[in-house]
Image (cartoon, helix red, strand yellow):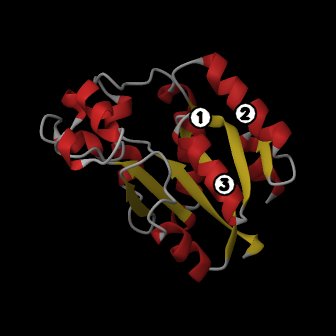
Amino acid sequence: MNPEKWTHLCIDMQRMFAESTPWQVAWIPKVFDQVSEVATRFPDRTIFTRFVPPSSPEEMPGMWRPYYEKWPMMTTSELDPVLVDLVPDLRRLVPPARIFDKTTYSPWTSGRLHNALLHQDIGTLVVTGGETDICVLATTLGAIDLGYRVVLLKDALWSTTDQTHDASLQLLGNRFSVQVDVINTDGWLSSL
């Protein structure tokens, strides 16, 4: 893993979080320009994750089943399938940008993403997207465990609440300061 080699990992910039669904997040428009700036400048270095719900709660193991019993309208049998895709302005970047689908908060569970990054000798992940206190948190903690350096672009991350967003960035930036950098997008871009 070469820390000088980086990729942009954009977490769950999907229509189901940007458009009118029970999971819509009002913050996405506030950070979209920063996310788009990084992805548009570096589409060949961008991997978009997509959180893909099952078609029914019964398809999921353990506590994921009651989770989707609470949110049946968000299963793919009830949700318009186009809402699982990336927001259109980012979707147009694929290819050369790539998509990685996941069924859990963390993209590391299957091992496929880590293997792909190891094959490219990637050692640093530049993270944008959301939610800061759920999927970004799971992505960051998993990346730390696997040995990656993580750069969180704090003005390109979204969440549903200021309090948990701020607390997550404080935790990650302070407790994991050797492995995680928290920086604004402009500051990171100017450092390249």
* Residue type (three-letter) at the residue carrying disc 3: Val
Say which element carries label 1.
Answer: loop
Distance from the alpha carbon under mark 3 to that under mark 1? 14 Å
Report crowding for label 2: few under 14, some 14 to 19, many 20 or more residues within 10 A (C-alpha): many
**Residue designated by label 3:** 126
Of tags 3 and 2, which is closer to the observer?
Answer: 2
In percent of width and height, residue 23 lies at 35, 26
**Residue designated by label 2:** 169
Name the residue nearer the viewer: 42 or 22. 22
Quarter of the image for residue 186 reads: top right
Which numbered disc covers residue 17?
A: none
Q: Are marks 3 and 1 in contact (CB under 8 Å)?
A: no
Distance from the alpha carbon under mark 1 to that under mark 2? 8 Å
In percent of width and height, residue 12 lies at 44, 44
Question: Residue at (58%, 50%) from the top-left corner?
Answer: 139
* Residue type (three-letter) at the residue carrying disc 2: Leu
